[in-house]
Image (cartoon, rainbow, N blue to C red):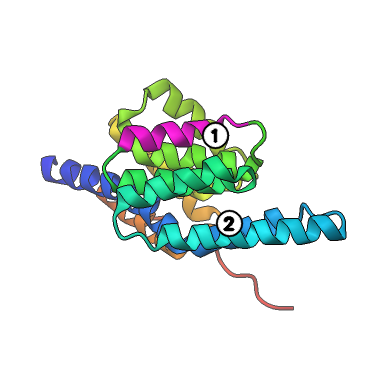
Amino acid sequence: MHNNDSFIEEVSEEVRRDRFYAWLRRWRWLLIALVVLIVGAAAVNEWRKLHWASRSQTAGDAFRAAYGETDAAARAAAFGGLAASNARAAVLAKLAEAGAKAEAGDTEGAAALLAEVAGDGAAGELYRALASLQRVMLLGNAMAASERQATLELLTNPGAPFRPLALEQRALMHLDAGDKAAAIAYLGEALAEPGASEALRTRARQLIVASGGTVPAPAPVAAGG
């Protein structure tokens, strides 16, 4: 039983960190593309089109240069400078800066940036939800239990943009608290989510088995008409 619990704790910790870093590595170019789209969409006349096209190119170049930094601390500084100098790219730059700070070992600084984005009323709902989820993933059980629970309750509401990942994090929260039954229930919900990735499903199955549960059978596929 002790070995099993140790395995669950190790998997839980690896899930939090791996998902946080993997998201940043996988979607870094999407961040750049979003900056270009957001900045470009602000143009309302020919002069502003030319003006913002120039700024979008500048922002895109700045993102590429920042991601080219091999040192995580230098990369964080580059993103911080971009956030300060380009208001339209600030939210995405802060998310990227938080990832670089976390990679550099500055967990506190990364968490503070994510909290800033999550609480920014001017940022889009998607970005606020993403920042909240990343903060939970980064801090894990180092986060105040009441805040962690309240954040995940919001992120697991039906229709929430990152519901499958939030359900996984909610399960990990209950595993940290020793409540395996609740964890298994949330992992089952994550498995049933249409938007859950295969990687998430694999982790959920592993945690269910390690926690002493039974993996639900896949839903039957309806026959074609």
- The spot of residue 59 in percent (x, y) is 58, 56
- The spot of residue 213 in percent (x, y) is 32, 48
Which mark is in front, 2 or 1? 2
Q: With respect to residue 155, does 89 lie above or below?
A: below
| Amino acid identity at mark 1 | Ala
**Image quarter of the N terminus:** top left
Q: Which residues are magenta?
A: 107-120
Near-viewer residue (41 or 24): 41
**Image quarter of the C terminus:** bottom right
- Residue at 87% x, 56% y is 45
Residue 185 visible? The answer is no
Image quadrant where residue 182 sits: top left
Q: Main secondary structure of the magenta part?
A: helix
Near-viewer residue (180 or 50): 50
Q: CA distance from mark 2 to mark 1?
A: 22 Å
Name the residue carrying label 1.
Answer: 118
Report whether 122 appears left or right of 133: right
Kind of element beneath mark 2: helix
Residue 59: which disc?
A: 2
- Mark 1: give few (<14), some (14-19) or many (20+) Cα within 10 Å: many
Image quadrant where residue 91 sits: top right
Report whether 71 appears left or right of 1: right
- Residue at 31% x, 37% y is 107
- Residue at 47% x, 37% y is 114
| Amino acid identity at mark 2 | Ala
Report whether 215 appears left or right of 49: left
- The spot of residue 106 in percent (x, y) is 30, 38
Near-viewer residue (168 or 102): 102
Kind of element beneath mark 1: helix
Q: Extreme bottom residue here?
A: 225
Residue 42 visible? The answer is yes
Q: Extreme left residue here?
A: 2
